[in-house]
Protein backbone atom coordinates (compact mmCIF):
# COMPACT_ATOMS: atom_id res chain seq x y z
CA UNK A 1 0.00 0.00 0.00
CA UNK A 2 1.27 3.44 -0.91
CA UNK A 3 1.45 6.30 1.58
CA UNK A 4 -1.75 8.39 1.27
CA UNK A 5 0.27 11.58 1.84
CA UNK A 6 2.40 10.64 -1.16
CA UNK A 7 -0.66 10.02 -3.35
CA UNK A 8 -2.08 13.39 -2.33
CA UNK A 9 1.20 15.11 -3.20
CA UNK A 10 1.31 13.40 -6.60
CA UNK A 11 -2.18 14.70 -7.35
CA UNK A 12 -1.22 18.16 -6.10
CA UNK A 13 1.86 18.21 -8.36
CA UNK A 14 -0.25 17.26 -11.37
CA UNK A 15 -2.71 20.05 -10.60
CA UNK A 16 0.10 22.59 -10.27
CA UNK A 17 1.51 21.51 -13.64
CA UNK A 18 -1.94 21.75 -15.22
CA UNK A 19 -2.45 25.24 -13.80
CA UNK A 20 0.88 26.53 -15.13
CA UNK A 21 0.72 24.78 -18.49
CA UNK A 22 -2.96 25.18 -19.24
CA UNK A 23 -3.02 21.54 -20.37
CA UNK A 24 -4.48 18.42 -18.83
CA UNK A 25 -1.91 15.83 -17.77
CA UNK A 26 -3.88 12.99 -19.36
CA UNK A 27 -0.86 10.86 -20.30
CA UNK A 28 0.61 11.19 -16.81
CA UNK A 29 -2.68 10.21 -15.22
CA UNK A 30 -2.94 7.21 -17.56
CA UNK A 31 0.59 6.16 -16.66
CA UNK A 32 -0.21 6.39 -12.94
CA UNK A 33 -3.40 4.37 -13.47
CA UNK A 34 -1.43 1.72 -15.36
CA UNK A 35 1.71 1.48 -13.18
CA UNK A 36 0.70 3.04 -9.87
CA UNK A 37 2.20 6.29 -8.60
CA UNK A 38 5.51 4.78 -7.46
CA UNK A 39 5.90 2.79 -10.67
CA UNK A 40 5.04 5.74 -12.89
CA UNK A 41 7.35 8.17 -11.11
CA UNK A 42 10.13 5.58 -11.14
CA UNK A 43 9.80 5.25 -14.90
CA UNK A 44 9.82 9.01 -15.36
CA UNK A 45 12.99 9.45 -13.28
CA UNK A 46 15.05 7.07 -15.44
CA UNK A 47 13.64 8.21 -18.77
CA UNK A 48 16.17 9.78 -21.11
CA UNK A 49 13.57 12.41 -21.94
CA UNK A 50 12.98 15.36 -19.66
CA UNK A 51 9.23 15.52 -19.12
CA UNK A 52 7.22 18.59 -19.99
CA UNK A 53 6.01 18.87 -16.39
CA UNK A 54 9.58 19.20 -15.13
CA UNK A 55 10.30 21.90 -17.70
CA UNK A 56 7.16 23.85 -16.85
CA UNK A 57 7.82 23.71 -13.10
CA UNK A 58 11.51 24.52 -13.62
CA UNK A 59 10.67 27.53 -15.76
CA UNK A 60 8.24 28.77 -13.07
CA UNK A 61 10.81 28.24 -10.30
CA UNK A 62 8.67 25.49 -8.73
CA UNK A 63 11.01 22.46 -8.82
CA UNK A 64 10.27 21.91 -5.14
CA UNK A 65 6.83 20.78 -6.28
CA UNK A 66 8.02 18.47 -9.05
CA UNK A 67 7.79 14.69 -9.19
CA UNK A 68 11.56 14.68 -8.67
CA UNK A 69 11.15 16.53 -5.39
CA UNK A 70 8.45 14.06 -4.33
CA UNK A 71 10.75 11.11 -5.03
CA UNK A 72 13.40 12.69 -2.81
CA UNK A 73 10.93 13.54 -0.03
CA UNK A 74 9.37 10.07 -0.10
CA UNK A 75 12.63 8.26 -0.78
CA UNK A 76 11.63 5.27 1.34
CA UNK A 77 9.07 4.34 -1.37
CA UNK A 78 11.69 4.18 -4.14
CA UNK A 79 14.79 2.22 -5.06
CA UNK A 80 18.05 4.07 -4.36
CA UNK A 81 18.86 4.47 -8.06
CA UNK A 82 15.51 6.19 -8.63
CA UNK A 83 16.18 8.63 -5.78
CA UNK A 84 19.67 9.27 -7.18
CA UNK A 85 18.21 10.04 -10.62
CA UNK A 86 15.68 12.43 -9.10
CA UNK A 87 18.41 14.19 -7.11
CA UNK A 88 20.56 14.51 -10.23
CA UNK A 89 17.69 16.08 -12.17
CA UNK A 90 17.02 18.56 -9.37
CA UNK A 91 20.70 19.51 -9.15
CA UNK A 92 21.08 19.78 -12.94
CA UNK A 93 17.74 21.14 -14.17
CA UNK A 94 19.14 22.54 -17.43
CA UNK A 95 21.38 19.59 -18.38
CA UNK A 96 18.58 17.68 -20.08
CA UNK A 97 16.64 19.44 -22.81
Image (cartoon, rainbow, N blue to C red):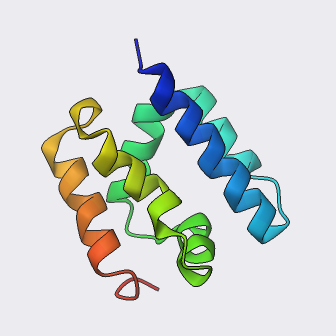
Residue under the image location 61 percent in, 70 percent down: 52
Is 92 located above or below residue 10 in the figure? below
Q: Is residue 44 left or right of residue 56?
A: left
Q: Position of residue 16 (x, y in %)?
A: 69, 57
Q: Position of residue 93 (x, y in %)?
A: 39, 81
In the displayed image of the protein, which residue is found farthest to the right?
22
Based on the displayed image, in which of its 4 quarters is residue 32 positioned? top right
Is 57 located above or below residue 8 in the figure? below
Depth check: 88 or 32 in front? 88
How many labels sit on residues?
0
Q: Is residue 8 left or right of residue 25?
A: left
In the displayed image of the protein, which residue is found farthest to the top?
1
Does residue 8 appear in the picture of this structure?
Answer: yes
Is 9 located above or below residue 68 in the figure? above
Q: Position of residue 48 (x, y in %)?
A: 37, 69
Residue under the image location 47 percent in, 40 percent down: 40
Q: Is residue 10 left or right of residue 23?
A: left
Residue under the image location 48 percent in, 69 percent down: 63
Based on the displayed image, in which of its 4 quarters is residue 61 positioned? bottom right
Does residue 36 appear in the picture of this structure?
Answer: no
Amino acid sequence: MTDPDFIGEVDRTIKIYEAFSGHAAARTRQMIDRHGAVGALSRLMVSADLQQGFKVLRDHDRLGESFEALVVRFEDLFKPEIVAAANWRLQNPYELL
